[in-house]
Amino acid sequence: MRQVKTLGLLGTGVIGGGWAARALHFGIDVVAADVKGEMEAWIRGAVENAEGALSRLTFAPLPPKGKLSFTTDLNLMAGSVDFIQENIPEQLELKQRILAQVSRHAPRDVLIASSTSGLMPSDLQRDLQHPERLLVGHPFNPVYLLPLVELVGGKTTSADALEAAARFYRYIGMHPLKVRREVPGHLTDRLQEALWREILHMVNDGVATTGELDESIIYGPGLRWAGMGTNLIYHLAGGETGMRHMLRQFGPCLKWPWTKLEAPELTEELIDRMVEGTQEQAAGRSIRELERLRDDYLVAIQQVLRQFNLGAGATLRALEERLYEEGAANARPALEAAAVGASTPAVLRLVETQVRPEWVDYNGHMTDSRYLQVFGDATDALLRYAGVDDVYRRSGRALYTVETHVTHQAEARALEPLYVASRVLEVDAKRVRLFHALHRRRDDVQVATAEQLYLHVNSTAGKAAPMDPEVQARLAALQAAQAPLPLPREAGRLARGAH
Ligand SMILES: NC(=O)c1ccc[n+]([C@@H]2O[C@H](COP(=O)([O-])OP(=O)(O)OC[C@H]3O[C@@H](n4cnc5c(N)ncnc54)[C@H](O)[C@@H]3O)[C@@H](O)[C@H]2O)c1
């Protein structure tokens, strides 16, 4: 299966728009195809709308954004992309026909995934050319923020196709959940439907309003679910003996039973109750307003879960680790050349970035804290090259910042492309002194500098300790290679660092 550089979207409504935003954000080009030409403006708007929350999800260094193009020619799209994600309306015959059509124009090694909420992949692959490359990749709205994607293979789907699709989805920050066997509704929608059906019954029977039923989730189970799901949480509900005790205690209720197996008839009266109830809950707020609120808290929740390396937070952490690793890998050739003295002593360009719109303060300039973040990314790239990576940190050793001196010299406005040039000024067994200069790419003007002193510590003991000799040697080689360069005039201002 080929590496995915360009994603093709078949159908660019709510879900197609979500896929586009996510893929573009992580550096994948997108060719969006829809039968309706007017969807071009719609998808461009949807991508722009998603960008606000998406750009706050992680501050790890990102590759340049992908490029979006649009066509009404489905076959043209199929012939020019590396992976096709289908998001047309949920009608089996329509999907079968269109999927078969595009499969005749997509090269054999191009995977085709369907976003279907409940159709079975074996039915979708019926008329396909090379049906082994079709699978279900079922996402959740908003696709650009929720990492879950259910992966389901049909009768003829190859294991390679599922593996390659999982790799691609992981690359764009998702959590592929492989469904062992195709069943209508996959896993999540089956669970959601059970809850939804009970809601309809209770509203229909006048037991509760839509608002009260939402409260019954928001203030309780909803909070638990995000980190642990239903089963692990029930395991905790059983006390010391866990799930076994829980089942003994509550198992008999399953015979009563509390719930119903079929949804109630969708009468006009029930529909009215559902609509009036949710309108009351919206309290005059537009769908757009509510979407923004939802997106903001979805970002915040994932950032909290990241601290616990739990659920969607663990996915975010893994994504960031890759982004930092890739940022460092881009800087590596320059570092290697400098360390062996292959080039004339050079200041190293370690980070290429641009001022993201949300980094800007009320003056329209990049805000103070973002300077530290960008300098931190340069330090990260340099230290990873020296060998201080995740494995090193997990061994209980790390470099702590003990002092920073920042100067601000010119303005950087939103979307301004920037780069960081770095030097190792000094290194011994326990300390490293670095100097970073942030430049505008368009005219090389120096925007800011940072001189930073790092102390090597044994993080378990909480004490300064010598670094790994190999790490020190790599840093020392860089320092020696750069030593002939004149000392920057902003350097040497640290209270503790300057010898
Ligand atoms: N909305 C959700 O919450 C959600 C969540 C997960 C999965 N899905 C699944 O994603 C798919 C799309 O759902 P949606 O909510 O984005 O629908 P939507 O109605 O918003 O978008 C469908 C798009 O497909 C286009 N289209 C129709 N026929 C086409 C054709 N022959 N070729 C190309 N484009 C065509 C339409 O013009 C429209 O832009 C469905 O299979 C749905 O089950 C939806």
Image (cartoon, rainbow, N blue to C red):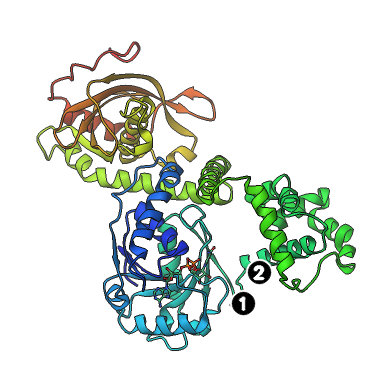
- Tell me which corner region of the image, top left, top right, bottom left or bottom right, holds residue 457: top left
Give the residue type at disc 2: Arg
Q: Which residue is mark 1?
A: 184
Q: Position of residue 231 (x, y in %)?
A: 72, 58
* In the image: residue 261, left or right of residue 92: right
Question: Could you tell me how far apart the alpha carbons at marks 2 and 1 are, in whole angstroms?
Answer: 8 Å
Q: Position of residue 419 (x, y in %)?
A: 23, 36
Residue 457 in the image: above or below residue 243: above
Residue 97 in the image: above or below residue 233: below
Which residue is located at x 36 percent, y 71 percent? Answer: 36
Q: Quadrant of the N terminus?
A: bottom left
Label 2, secondary structure: give it: helix
Whether residue 328 is visible here, answered yes or no, is yes
Say whether marks 2 and 1 touch (CB < 8 Å).
Answer: yes
10 Å crowding of disc 1: few (<14), some (14-19), many (20+): few
Q: Which residue is mark 2?
A: 190
